[in-house]
Amino acid sequence: MGMIEAIFWDMDGTMVDSEPLWGIATFEMSEAMGRRLTPELRERTIGGSFRNTVDVCAAHAGIEITEDDYTQLRSTLFARMNELFDAQLVLNPGVCSLLTALNMRDTPMLVTTNTERVLAERAIAAVGREFFTGSITGDEVPRPKPAPDMYLAAAERVGAQPSQCLVFEDSFNGMSAAVAAGCRVIGLHAEGAPAPTGVVPLRDLHGSLSLEGVTPELLDHWWAAIEPAQVPN
């Protein structure tokens, strides 16, 4: 079975408490497009790409979107997110201490986020760029999550098989991407929220969704209980 060869971290909702901020900006954008999203439709945008979010808003408002519209909406949304990040972005409990301990082991770690590079840099800096071997963002792969491209690229970058890589994810899109790539996945999703087959919930391993108290030694212990996802040939 071997040891953990690399760890890949989703950002929004997993390492930083940014999903409420994305919710603010997304609801505002949907209102500007003509119709405020319902909470259920907002859920469909979590962990997805910018285009997916715009498409959900446009369909709800019953409007057509041009490439020029995408460009303008992207600029407006990202400017708003920069404001919110500067004012309200905080790390989730336990993240910094676990990253610090793993960094002392020289475990390769990458940030793997659907957020585009221009905005992701702010959040990566808030967490601590020094913890990571690198990062891959949603605009740097052919297909963002829920496609497996990002996690396949991450495994290739560190020279490991996906089955020997551990992923922390909180959204259905992100967990689906990691499972499709063949990684081992710990889910930080809320109780009752759907998760792909093969994901092991953090609450089942640790009794909560918080990373407080999680150590590298605990990850080693859990690793044996987490089966790699079965990827169809």
Image: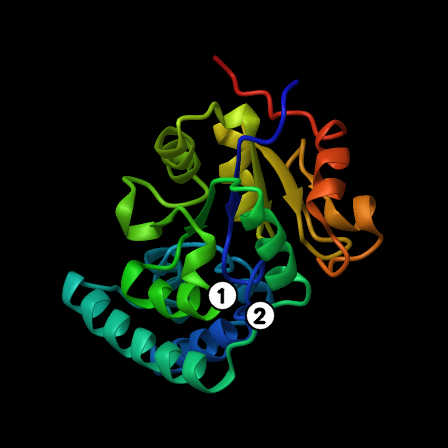
- In this figure, which residue is indicated by the disc labeled 2? 91
Q: Is residue 120 above or below residue 192?
A: below
Residue 154: tell me if it is visible: yes
- Which of the pair 68/165 is nearer the observer? 165
Q: Is residue 195 above or below residue 164?
A: below
The number of callouts visible is 2
Q: Amino acid at mark 1?
A: Val
Across and down, in percent, residue 18 comes to 52, 70
Residue 34: tell me if it is visible: no
SS at mark 2 in the image: loop
The residue drawn where x is 53% and y is 66% is 42
The residue drawn where x is 40% and y is 62% is 53
Q: Is residue 94 above or below residue 21?
A: above
Across and down, in percent, residue 160 comes to 45, 26
Pick out the residue farthest to the left. Answer: 68
Pointer 2: residues within 10 angstroms few (<14), some, or many (20+)?
Answer: some
> Horizontally, is 231 left or right of 65 in the view?
right
The residue drawn where x is 53% and y is 20% is 231
Circles 1 and 2: CB atoms closer than 8 Å? yes
Across and down, in percent, residue 72 comes to 20, 73
- Which of the pair 74/210 is nearer the observer? 210
Q: Amino acid at mark 2?
A: Leu
The residue drawn where x is 85% and y is 53% is 207
Residue 84 occupies which quadrant of the picture? bottom left
**CA distance separating discs 1 and 2:** 7 Å
SS at mark 1 in the image: helix
Across and down, in percent, residue 204 comes to 82, 45
- Which of the pair 112/172 is nearer the observer? 112
- In this figure, which residue is indicated by the disc labeled 1? 127
Pointer 1: residues within 10 angstroms few (<14), some, or many (20+)?
Answer: many
